[in-house]
Amino acid sequence: MAVLSQMRDRSAVILVVLLVLFVLSMAIGGLVGGADIIDIITGKNPNILGVINGTEITYTQFNQAYINELNAYRQRTGTEPAESQIGFVRNQVWEVFVQDILVKKAIQEKGLAATDHEILWRIRNNPPEDIKRNPSFQNDQRQFDMAMWQSALNDPNYPDQVWLQVEAHLRQRLPYEKLQQQLQAGVRITEDEIKREYLKQNQTVKVNYVFIDPQKIADKDIKINDDTLRDYYKNNKDEFKEEEKRQIQYVVFQTKATTKDSSEIRALADDILQRIKDGDDFGELAEIYSEDPVSKDKGGALGFFAKGDMVKAFEDAAFSGKPGETVGPIQTQHGLHIIKVEEKKTENGEEKVNARHILFKFTASRETLDKARDDAEYFAEQASEVPFKELSKNIGQTPQGSTFFIKGNGFVPGIGLNKRASGFIFSGKIGETGDVVESPQGLFVFKISGIQDERTKLFDEVSAIIKNKLKREKQNALAAMKAQKIYEKINSGTSFETIVAEDSLEIKESTDFSRTGYVAGVGREPKFIGAAFSLDVSGDVSKPVLATRGCYLIQLAQKKAFDEADFNKQKKQIASRLLQRKQSQVFANWYTEAKANADIKDFRSRFF
């Protein structure tokens, strides 16, 4: 009865958890509608961001999911996402929409659905993972307790709404599981695959090797004349094609804290310190004023930490304080800190401090930010009528200029990775001014100052590049020839050591390494590692191996034998891991094919 009573007390919490579970499972599916397609080109519905096999994704739907993901990122990291991370998150959200629509189509076409009997069985015998992770149904070891779950099921006083939400979640989830089961039905793991995986992770070799460095081939042995260079240029012009390039001029309006802002932040920190000394609660003040997203909601609590865990100025202040004492403000690269020392202890011979802190960051005030924004927007507006250089002079700046650059992945010199700015630059005309762009450096106002059309580079521009390429190829070929001669002498009966000494080469000895490991002096060089593991008898020498840096001859020193007993211990775990990997790959392959065959219209560039 005590358990049921406790569970009744928590029923409101459980209901909230299950509601969240259901909402999350419906988050994308519920947002994607199936309305008739509206001709976007005619402008009847400019809110359409994409269309997947006839199913619309509106900007409103997409943006809500996108904002949710950004908020989740902020909560996980306690920081604002960078421009590059914003683009990554946006693409992830798009992929979730696309995948959800394609999966739903497949489920519909295959007629997959969850029966009442299946849902009831799952509720009784295998509830959703989120239920299993709920502390209300876990024992003292934080393991799911089926008895506690069954007690809740049999409790007539339990809210019906809870079970309705679980049922709704499973009714949507089970068809997805059935689709996965159908796709993965033929996946099997063989004994040979398990053994290969075991050897890949566990078997090691040790080798002796010599390295024939192509760069040590004398220049006198390499003849490359002008005719050879011109012939290569003529026959490989595609290598020298250059995308359209553009350049910009820009000015930056700073959004960093001014001297006045910093003074005000220091004054605030001093005022809060005085309030603490006057008896105000440290934790309450931390929740109100601290700008540390990790500790703020915990009243500034940091827990115990040792020396070396914090930046030096912070830990020096914390370790010098006495329990109950408040010290600061202390300045670090993060800002100003007021620190309250809660207690100290020695653990395993190491001194530790338990402390709270309030962080004040040196950030620009709203007044500074608003002024920078107003100035930047006014400048951008005037730049369409007044020469950029003249405007810049009026505000005491000299416009900065970029080199010519390609569109690429959206990187803009000076600004950084910004696909929106890049899109404008590569679609506008010379002299056009873009919108104000925010970046960690400040607010950018830029104009397109030059366009270099797509072209093939002239011979004179690339002749040195061609020469270096052909020289490297000849050096590699000569190094390989030298290695081959050594290998042939070894096959004729001369020892590895004797021949190496005759050619003044150095024998190097590796440490033990695996198929997925790192070889000191060589690196993760697949050809080298593959050749080493192809040798079976100590003393055997590989054929010449032409790798990234040069040519190698490899002699096996030692190879770890296959350990049958250890293999049998790991066999089950390896098989499970391989099965999961194969199953994931099967679904990934299905999705790739479904996506390739889908009718996908992506209009995100109109909005972002």
Image (cartoon, grey):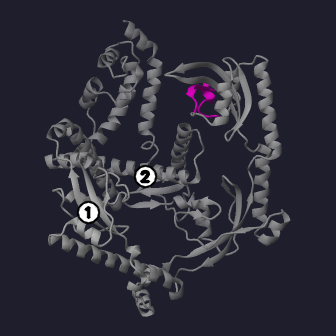
Neighbor class of circle 2 (other Cα within 10 Å; few <14, some 14-19, many 20+) is few
| Distance Cα–Cα, label 2 vs label 1 | 46 Å
In the visual, does 261 lie left or right of 65?
right
**Rendered-image quadrant of the C terminus:** bottom right
Residue 198 vs residue 28, the one in the foreground: 198
125 left or right, relative to 131: left
Q: Is residue 187 visible?
A: no
Give the mark nearest the N terminus, 2 or 1.
Answer: 2
Q: Is residue 224 visible?
A: yes
Q: Is residue 209 above or below residue 80?
A: below
Q: Relative to the observer, which residue lies in front, 518 or 479?
A: 479
Which residue appears at 28% of the width and 53% of the height?
Answer: 515
Residue 162 sits inside the magenta stretch: no
Identity of the residue drawn at 33% across and 65% down: 506
How many numbered circles are shown? Answer: 2
Judged from this view, the residue extending furthest toward the right is 394
Q: Nearer the viewer, mark 2 or mark 1?
A: 1
Residue where numbered disc 1 is placed: 554
Q: Locate the N terminus and report the quarter of the image it occupies.
A: top left
Can you give x and y, in whole percent of width and height, for residue 261 in the image?
80, 42
**Depth check: 603 or 546 in front?**
546
Q: Return the mark for residue 95.
A: 2
In this picture, is 203 found above or below 387? above
Query: Which amino acid type corresponds to the residue marked 1 in the rendered image?
Result: Ile
Measured as percent of width and height from the top left, residue 127 is found at: 31, 27
Q: Nearer the viewer, residue 273 or 415?
A: 273
Magenta residues? 292-307
Q: Residue at x 58, y 30 (%)?
A: 307
Rendered position, 25 above or below 435: above
